[in-house]
Amino acid sequence: MTNLIQPPGDASLLLLGHYDPALVVLSVGLAVLAGVAAMVVSSQADRFRGVPALGMVLAGGLALGSGVWAMHFVGMLALDLCRAAGYRLDFTVLSMLPSVLASSLALWLLMLKRQSNATLWLGGGLFGLGVGAMHYTGMLALEGMDGLHFDPLLVAVSVVVAVLLAVFALWVRQALQRWRPGLPQAWRHAVSGVLMGLSVSAMHYCGMAAVHFAGTPSPGDASQAGSPWLMTGIAVTVAAISLLVVLLSMVIRLRALTAQLRYMQSAVASSHDAIVTKTTEGVVLTWNQGATDIFGYSADEMVGQPITRLFKPEDVHTEKDLLRRVLAGESVPNAEAVRLRKDGSEVHLSVTISPIRDEAGRIMGASKLAQDISDRKAIADLQLAKLQAEKIAEARGSFLANMSHEVRTPMNAILGFISVLLAGPLQTEQREQLKVVEDSARSLLRLLNEILDTAKLDKGLVEFEICPFSVDALVSELALVYGASARSRGIELQVAQQPGVAPCYEGDGFRIRQVLGNLLDNAIKFTPVGRVSLDIRAERGGLVFEVGDTGVGMPATYLDQIFEPFSQVDSSTTRRFGGTGLGTTICKKLVELMGGTIDVVSALHQGSTFTVWLPLPVASIEVQADLPAAGAVALPRLNILIADDVLLNMEVLRLLLGKAHHVTCVGGGAEAVRAAADERFDVVLMDMQMPEVDGLEASRRIRAQEKAEHRLPVPIIALTASALAQDMAAASASGMNGFVTKSSKLPVLLAEIARVLDLAKAVPEAVC
């Protein structure tokens, strides 16, 4: 080792040689070509993963390593020492190994997706050290010299030069990719490859400067022994390695491209969407299974055929416009179209058409991706139809509500004035005539109510409000309303509530009242003499309501038709008792919508019994039932505010209540708010439907005034021609305390006033 480092003491023994310029240029050229080849191969390796990528890295390392090795020995041959020399085969071959390994490691680091300065220095360092190891191992292969000595400082300088230049070459490649992305790849490979080759050449000739040759020049032929054979061996080796690298790269790339092509073909073939390519004239080139599934045509039937075979006759002209846009380089994304299947049926598609270009960028055809959206289109059409139906239903519901209000309002006025006249002094004949008018008006009102209710049920516009309701309140109200009607006909109304019935249940109390009211009204109407009964009991997780009478009854053959619309026992019944035959139909539909059942048992001239069962769970909270029993209520003299935009309705209430109470009338919601602010009233009767400021808004404003002025709230009772559950809920939400329909008789209104004022029950005579 010491002999390798220390030069001979006699300077005359040092051999001084000169370089052959042609061979120097050749050696540098070999290094540059090897560097460029390595960059090209490594760039191709970026496209692969796994074994193909590893193979490309090894191929690039072999190309660069063998090129460095060839450059070294050509550079050695370029030095003429005037002394014959040879090379040991084992060291010559072995010297290639560190170069190839270092080159492969450097290129592998270059492939990493996340590169940093550390990887850059590591790759350049490994390559520089590998080149240095190859160089000095190759120097040891030299034979025929008396002495071979190395200058340590220059050796270190040569290695540092190799490392720095290699790092610089790799950095330039990254910098070009980052800062000049538009620069062609060939230029990036050429620049970085040239720099890599120059780094190898610089290291070699720096390393040659670090070597001292000692010996005595040989007489005669001073050329290096065996140099022609060495040159031939180097050339053959480099050519073989280069050819091997090229073939290996081609095989790896071909296999990778084949696998990629198979993958793409599999993806296209397995797609449920139609993927079709066509020429610029519209002739089909490829046709996948998805297209067969959608259109019904096989690939054999469509390839070579015009795509317009799928078009509807009136749409054929659109293909020219599509091809024109494709030839202009334009894509047509997500266009909706209707095409024809093989069986002639239509299919709705979402189509994307894009141009296909060759390597030169020329448009050579078009690709078509078509997705079957028939189901989605059908769903969208259904949603649109549903939206339109909802709008129609909303308009119909609004129409029915307006009709209900507009029809009931004059009828309420008629009934109100009849009540006023009946309360005054009349002759017997006049009183009987007014009774007939009142009965007729109430029959007409009932007819209108039944028709409107039937229309709502048929259109599905009836909504249920499930909340706790009091059974006692239900019984009291039914007894109050229908007890008076029964007594006026000389009929007894019996109401029985069996043990086991809970105080409160969860359900729509308003609809239950409507069903029982219809049944009680029918029972009273079809019972000339005798009695009508209502029996309530708890059974099967709900309540059973049994309405019986001792009236005319029905034959057994008619029982199957009793719940059909407009059905009566016979024409004589219609003439005798009146009615539309809708009452029981409404009852049945309401009961079934609430999840219950309704049955009837009857015999001709022996009365009828209707049994209603409803699945009503017991309420977890109790609802106070403050309704009075049948009969009127004694009220003290009250200061009452009436707000109604219909003058007739307001006049009726004034006449009915004005004899016993002080009544103030206003014609709108805004006037009611001002009156409530100026004067203290005992109760407010508020119409819900008024122009500009309706009863709901007026109630909210009154409650806001009371809160701001710290006044006790005045009881407000809603008056409305409509009695839907949502109306009651809206009245309660606005701050109203009570609710009465305008068609209700005076005792019902007085009972509601007594309830909201929390007054004790009293005898009927104290009312007027």
Image: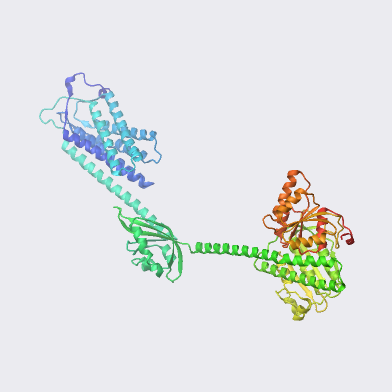
Left or right, residue 584 beside residue 194: right
Left or right, residue 615 beside residue 267: right
- x 24%, y 40%: residue: 33
User: Observer-nearest residue: 400 or 244?
Assistant: 400
Residue lying furthest left: 220
In which quadrant is the C terminus drawn? bottom right
Count of numbered badges drawn on the protein: 0
Q: Is residue 445 above or below residue 704?
A: below
User: Observer-nearest residue: 766 or 540?
Assistant: 766
Residue 630, horizontal then vertical, whole percent: 85, 63
Residue 576, horizontal then vertical, whole percent: 79, 78
Asked whether the viewer can see residue 475, the reply is no
Q: Residue 535: which quarter of the image?
A: bottom right
User: Observer-nearest residue: 438 or 283?
Assistant: 438
User: Observer-nearest residue: 233 or 381?
Assistant: 381
Residue 522, horizontal then vertical, whole percent: 78, 72
Asked whether the viewer can see residue 244, the reply is yes
Left or right, residue 412 beside residue 495: left
- x 31%, y 50%: residue: 251
Residue 122, horizontal then vertical, whole percent: 36, 33
In which quadrant is the N terminus drawn? top left
Q: Which colour scheme is used?
A: rainbow
Left or right, residue 318 beside residue 729: left
Q: In this view, does 443 lie above or below 141?
A: below
